[in-house]
Image (spheres, grey):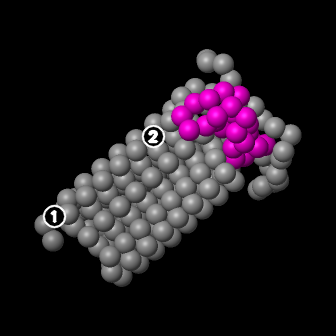
Amino acid sequence: MEDKKYELTDSTIEYDEKTLYQIKALKDFADVKAGDLGGYIEKEDNLSHEGNCWVYDKAKVFGNAEVYDNAQIKHKAKVAGSSKVYENAEIFGEAEIYVKAQIYGEAEVGGNAQVYDNAEVYGKAQVYDNSEVYEEARVYGNAKVYDYAVVYNNAKVYGNAEVGGNTQLRFYEFVNENKKMIDNVCLLYTSDAADE
């Protein structure tokens, strides 16, 4: 392991019945300078000392969640449970990642979006606004999920697909590269959007 790049400070907050410690950078890396204060973590296992990963602003990482590689957690975002955020992923706004969700690649989750259970968001996918991705759902490629859209169960959204509005996808494989669903659509038990 490399030398420590941050330390836990004496500045703490109580959140979700846990004590979280504000972090302080011990050396320069990426856009972080030695002495910069970051967000809050429960323990050093939450944030790797390797790579350029960082928790900024008032963001929180706790429980058994892990942030590593070059991932960034910003603003008031929360990463909890046994979730993992890694590679070059970015979580921002008031987004929440929890249970065992994984966010990686160059994926972005922001706004008030929630990704949880065993869901995964990766590639260059974006999940934002008030959308939710959960259970075993996958969002990847250049796909976008936004507004109040809900993607869950075993649904997959990928390629250049966009799912927005109040759309709900469940047991649905959304495969048409340029398809957009932005109205109040509810799709259950379908398997091939390209044929529709």
Distance CA(mark 1)–CA(mark 2) = 31 Å
Give the mark, 1 or 2, whose residue is nearer the N terminus.
2
Q: Judge whether residue 61 can be spotted in this image.
A: no
Characterize the local packing of mark 2: few (<14), some (14-19) or many (20 or more) Cα atoms within 10 angstroms: many
**Farthest residue, direction bottom:** 184
Q: SS for tag 2? A: loop
Q: Amino acid at mark 1?
A: Ala
Residue 89, can we see it?
Answer: yes
30 is within the stretch colored magenta: yes
Residue with the mark numbered 1: 194
Give the magenta range: 21-47
Could you tell me residue 161's position as x and y percent?
27, 62
Circle 1 Cα neighbour tier, 10 Å, few/some/many (<14 / 14–19 / ≥20): few
Q: Give the residue furthest to the right.
A: 10
Up-down relation of residue 128 to residue 164 (above or below): above
Residue 122 sits inside the magenta stretch: no
Question: Which residue appears at 45% of the width and 74% of the height?
Answer: 148
Q: In the displayed structure, does residue 137 sit left or right of residue 9?
A: left
**Spot occupied by residue 26 in the image (x, y as percentages of width and height):** 71, 28
Q: Residue at x 30, y 50 (%)?
A: 141
Q: Position of residue 195 (x, y in %)?
A: 13, 66
Q: Decide which of 192, 141 is in the foreground and name it.
A: 141
The image's mark for residue 88 is: 2
